[in-house]
Image (cartoon, grey):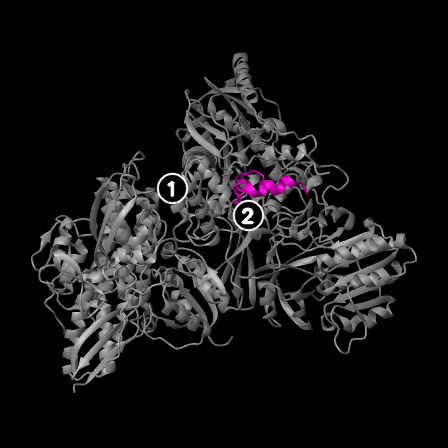
Amino acid sequence: MTSAPPTPPALQPLHANPWLTRTVRIADVIDEAPGVATYRLTLDGDTDPAAYSFIPGQFNMLYLPGVGESAISMSGDPTRSDGWTHTVRVAGNVTKTLAGLKRGDTLGLRGPFGAGWPVEELAGVNLIIVAGGLGMAPIRSLIYHVVHHRNRYGHVWLICGARTPEALLYRREYDLWRQHDIDVHETVDRATADWTGQIGVVTTLIDRLRLPHPKQTQLVACGPEVMMKYAAASGVRLGIAVERTWLSLERNMQCATGLCGHCQLGPEFICKDGPVLRYDHIRPYLFVEQL
Amino acid sequence: MSRKPRLAVFKFASCDGCQLSLLDAEDELLEICERIDIAHFAEASSDLQAGPYDIALVEGSITTDEDAARILRVRAESRFLITIGACATSGGVQALRNWGHIDEWVRSVYPSPEFIHTLATSTPIAAHVHVDFELHGCPINHHQLVDVLVAVAEGRQPRVPSHSVCLDCKRRGTVCHVVSRGIPCLGPVTQSGCGALCPAYDRGCYGCYGPSHPANTTSLLRQFQKLGRAPDELVPLLRNFNATTPEFRRASEQLVVLQTNGEGKSL
Amino acid sequence: MLTLVPSPLALRFGEGSGERFYYFDKQLHMTASSPTLFFAKPQLQALLNELRGRGYCVVGPTIEQEAIVYSELQSVEELPRGWTDEQAPGQYRLKRRDDDAWFGFVVGPHSWKKYLFPPKATLLSAEKTETGWAFIPRAADSTRYALLGVRACELAAIRIQDQVFLNGPYQDPIYRERREQLFIVAVNCTQAASTCFCTSMNTGPRCERGFDLALTEIDEGFLCEIGSDLGRDVVAACSAAPATPAQLQAAETARQQAVDQMTRHMDISDLPGLLLGNLDHPRWKEVGERCLSCTNCTMVCPTCFCSSVTEVRDLNMETVERERVWDSCFNPDFSNLGGSPVRNDTASRYRQWLTHKLDSWHDQFGTSGCVGCGRCITWCPVGIDLTEEVAAIRETPTP
Amino acid sequence: MSSRDIIEVPILTRVEGEGGVTIRLRDGVIENVELNIYEPPRLFEALLRGRPLEDTPDITARICGICPVAYQMSSVHALEAALGVQISPTIRRLRRLLYCGEWIESHALHIHLLHAPDFFGAASGIELAQRFPNEIKRGLQLKKFGNRLLEVLGGRAIHPISVRVGGFHRLPSRDEMASLIPHFEWGVQAAVETTRWVAAFSFPDFEQPYEFVSLSHPDEYPMNEGDIVSSHGLHIPVTEYDRHFVEEHVAHSTALHAVRRDQRTPYFLGPLARVNLNRDRLSPTAKRLADEVNFPLHCRNPFQSIIARSLELVHAYEEALAILRDYASVGPLSSEPAYMPYQPKDGSGCAATEAPRGLLFHEYRIDAAGKIVSGRIIPPTSQNQKQIERDVTDYLTGRLLAGATRDDMALDCERLVRTYDPCISCSTHFLKVRWEEPT
């Protein structure tokens, strides 16, 4: 079950023309939360199963003709060979239009792009995974990876936060993850009557962790930028090295290949050098306003 | 939505040019009518249907008590209200009265001023009711109008670029008149939309799409003064079709203060 | 002709190794070195004819809109012979020269990037079919450009854009197509404008490499250096002879004049580093008050490469084209994220531009993004001068 | 006690600008007819005062989005008269060309989308397109090429930006002009088809003894130059406009009406007047076509103005084509100035040009610094207004006698008003009319 399939970067075919866009069809749609749905997208025709491979944390550009493109990270299992999985929240015109599509409809896709989670560097130590809101989407593909390679990772904490209980993504899978020895903690900003878990920001959960070997621990985070900044700071307080802290950032992206200039943060192109970036590389810039 | 969205066009104080833009979309007009139900458009059709409307296009500014009351009714029966053109978005050229004395102005034009009932100001629609989207220009660009209509009909938020005219000048290879000829051009502080027409026709931009954001008029006007342009030459440049937008109004009033306090001073 | 060397494939570009190499550096293939040639001025028409005969669209300097711009040339008569350009911050004027020099000016409002990285280009189109959307790659552009009159700073700019568009993990197909077919006739500057500072940036005024042919104008004609076998082949049409020592000396003197006239200077000793180390400097706010955020500096810059993609659709959405247009970090919409700009004030946009151009460009592409051509100084409507801004930041670094 | 009642057309549709008509009846007889203007005054003459004279063509264009060129043309000619500027032959030709673009755009709009629906009981041109798809599509194409010409020459179709006192800001290139030629070759033929189509409509039987007024020029169909002539024998230079025409304040209405100064009678402007008074100077194709469709020599039926408008559409296309061909082959010299230089000086000047809807009179006084001291603008619809009211009275009297219903009469009234292609946005001289309910 946890055989380790290869996850080669799929950059090659896009190299010559990064604008090459493929037609993908919506194979199914799962409603996750209000305004959030997961789409499985498949290429038409006989396709090499490896066509869907990616590194957890990478993203695709989803294209709705006449509306535009949007960078959406993969939220599925990187070993799956039956399509791309994307969890999308309605935010702008592209995602709104996507929400209006149904099974069988087509759209365009370019990808995968970007630097994903550093799965090799994360191996061999303990791991704190922090996800806020929709940031859970790219985290899930990392969890799939961890589950498939469970013996390569030490203690794994997963700390999930969301505004409300119903906004916590993939809760149906938490038990399965726990069975794989992942220490799942949840917290919400605003509880509902039936909520019995934590209330508050994710950092309070991080601060409470008792790390046996902080120096042997890595922290990864994805969520709102402000949440990630605080999560990283909490990690530092616990003794986690800045070189072992990784954040997945978001910026306006148009080309996804570092050629359009939109997504820069200091010297980093978030699309091509990121979206997952090492905290010590970006810390000088992350706290500068309007950079 | 399964039924076609119902469109209404309303006119206030204006020249008709912006609503004509819809009829100027010759290639698209009949197709638009297949997707949008033109329920009320007096300039084009005698079939004036009652509201409510899904989309209202409002042209013109408010200059009379009756119009101030009418725009409230238009708002009440319209789901998505779009103002089109400089009159509706900023008060238009008729808003120059805001700096004059309305009674004297009326007397200068009409032999029987007592019959004229007009307000002392010309105000944009947004000063009276909530506006869902503003399309700038004197006149508006009919391609932008079609894009906005299609976006609303498809349930998307309409968007138009808000950068300065300069970007369009450069994309079309037009040489900057401020730098190469020293002529005052409002391009650096004016919103895109016209396609950077005036500079391509060898004249400076006169700001008919209104201020860009940001519109650093202070810095630009200081430069024009450095180039030898006196305030009394620059005030009319700012006071035309978008004179009462906050950015252009502030700039022209600063210049008037300079003018009153004596020439030779700079912003 | 240019032969392609495959671009290095690296996910993270050159990290740690410090190894950078330019895509086209070794492209201009030469089997043997050639002596510098000389030909009489009217022979330039023969060169132009030869290039046109070989199917090139020859573009070069000409007078339009009261400025020297780059446009298609049929004849050398269209060159701005006897004209020069006077430049200062925020000011450009054409002036008659007191001689009949053919290239007696420096650089104008256009840069060659408009031919390699066009202001508008279709990337692909989408068509609605019975089974759904089909995506059709753009058709290849077969226009072959020959650039006539490329200055040293502009050769440097092309090298920098090569680095951006061709030498990373991804290549821009439009740029690549046009670049691979490019023929370059460089021209050495024999004068400098008050806004020039290529000597500070080590990009000129001497054309050292990256051309097929390089000319130096002297009173009696042109000296011609050969940079590629193709260049040698083409110049054969010009009845050129090896230059005499006197002609070589005259060319050297002419070129030295440009160096001697260079008055502007930018200290790059602490670049990169200076600007990224001063992100909170008060000068950003101060320049933000003068800056119009109009985008002119980035548009005239021969290396700025930012762009945006827009949808061009017909009403019924049967076909949609994706069009790439020049864009700018000074456009507030440029950094939009979730409906509002990340860089929301002019100071932050100016800071982004300058730190990128002079500082983070080094991290990204192994070179400065500035070639010292001075266009951003001349063509800023309010005359903001980046060399002054850098100096001001250096003067009082943030503690 | 006599009985009074009112027929109201609350909103005149398919006209430019907003207005209505009120018809008052007493004892079954039409007592009076009033054209109500809802257009709020925008006070252009007042806001021009003190501005640089150079602003005038840009600002007066904003009086009307349908015929901005007319306002630009009358204003620049009036100011050039004040400044003593003589324009070059090239500029003169290009101004005619620009005017052709506006006539084409405005006429094609009115013929196809505003007026033709009346002959088939359709509510709009869009509705008519279901019945006559080819004709309406052809009409839209005809309109489009007019706009395209305005765009090339003027920068854009609505409120062009290239016109300036003394000439143009920029002369078009030969290539730009040449690119239009194929469209205009098509346009001449298409406009001929349009004319044949509209000439076959059936027209109400209604004729009046109008006094037609237009410009007239010995060598050409009138646009920018010429004397003012009338079908009653008037022939005066434009400078004498005020001696023969007057805007008056009549008792029954608060609207200004222009009338003949001597007899206080209304007069008739527009395509019908122009064709009647200048038929022999129509372009060759238009002239032949007028004969072919048996257009009456002195047509007095306002409903047939759609034919006159179509003939002018043919003329405008044909004349534009000739100018385009000429310009594309000969063109201006590269040294030819786009505009004539001038020095500001104290003075005044007036001019009249032929807007699509008829004679448009402008007069300005300027000071030595080149600022506008005062301006006066008399748009064609304001001059036609009294004639429109009289027509409605006479026509409806006949319809009343024939037993027409009130609804039909309201419709009739609207249709008749539309034949004038009134442009109510040109509203500088229209006042809001307040109505009192009869007691």
Q: Badge 2 local density, few (<14 within 10 Å), some, or many (20+)?
A: many
**Given the image, what chain letter belongs to the residue carrying mark 2?**
C
- Image position, residue D225 (x, y; %): 18, 48
* Residue at image mark 2: C327
Q: Which residue is drawn at the image coordinates 21% and 46% (left, top)?
A: D349
Regarding mark 2 in the picture, which secondary structure is present there?
loop
Q: Foreground residue, D398 or B98?
A: B98
- On the rendered image, what quadrant is the N terminus of chain D found in? bottom left
View extreme (bottom): residue:
D1
Relative to D182, C115 lies left or right = right
Q: Secondary structure at mark 1?
A: helix
> What number of labels is visible?
2
Residue identifier under label 1: B233
Residue A92 lies, in percent from the top left, at 59, 63
Q: Residue at x 56, y 51 (%)?
A: C332
Q: Which residues are magenta?
A: C280-303
